[in-house]
Image (tube, helix red, strand yellow):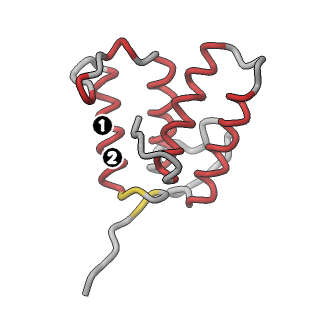
Amino acid sequence: MRTESPRIGVRRVDEVESAYRSLAAEATGRGARGGRALQERPRALREGAAEAYRWALAREPQGPITGLRAREVPDVWRLTAEADAAAVLLDDPACPHDTRDYVRGVHDALAWLCGHSDQRV
């Protein structure tokens, strides 16, 4: 009998945990993925991605863009709705640069979780 591993969006929970741990290690300067220097990614982008991962792992009580409250791991529909809200902000020319980096981090992390991108943040 084969059992399905738990998932967040289309990714296995252990993949999401690994992505979050890698991002946390970058933030503390203990590592970088793929040889990419820590300073190449804006801090706000890393913070946005980290908050998206924490929310997806049910460690944050509300969505990073919409503020939607959740008590458990959000389903793929909620993840997609949050990614879509981030995309709307990214398309807004009035979105400030520092906010744009944060929103880009949220969007890119959630897009990966939903399977809309193969690029992990």
Residue 115 picture location, percent across and down: 49, 53
Q: Quadrant of residue 100?
A: top right
110 up-or-down from 106: above or below: below
Q: Which residue is mark 1?
A: 21
Q: Could you tell me which quadrant the C terminus lies in?
A: top left
| Residue at figure coordinates x 63%, y 59% from the top left | 77
| Residue at figure coordinates x 25%, y 87% from the top left | 1
Which SS class for mark 2? helix
Q: Which residue is mark 2?
A: 17
47 up-or-down from 65: above or below: above
Q: Quadrant of residue 19?
A: top left
What type is the residue that disc 2 sits on?
A: Glu
The answer to whether the residue labelled 2 contacts the one labelled 1, judged by CB atoms less than 8 Å apart, is: yes
Residue 21 picture location, percent across and down: 30, 37
Q: Whole-Å distance between the Cαs marked 2 and 1?
A: 6 Å
| Residue at figure coordinates x 51%, y 30% from the top left | 105
What type is the residue that disc 1 sits on?
A: Arg
Q: Quadrant of residue 85?
A: top right
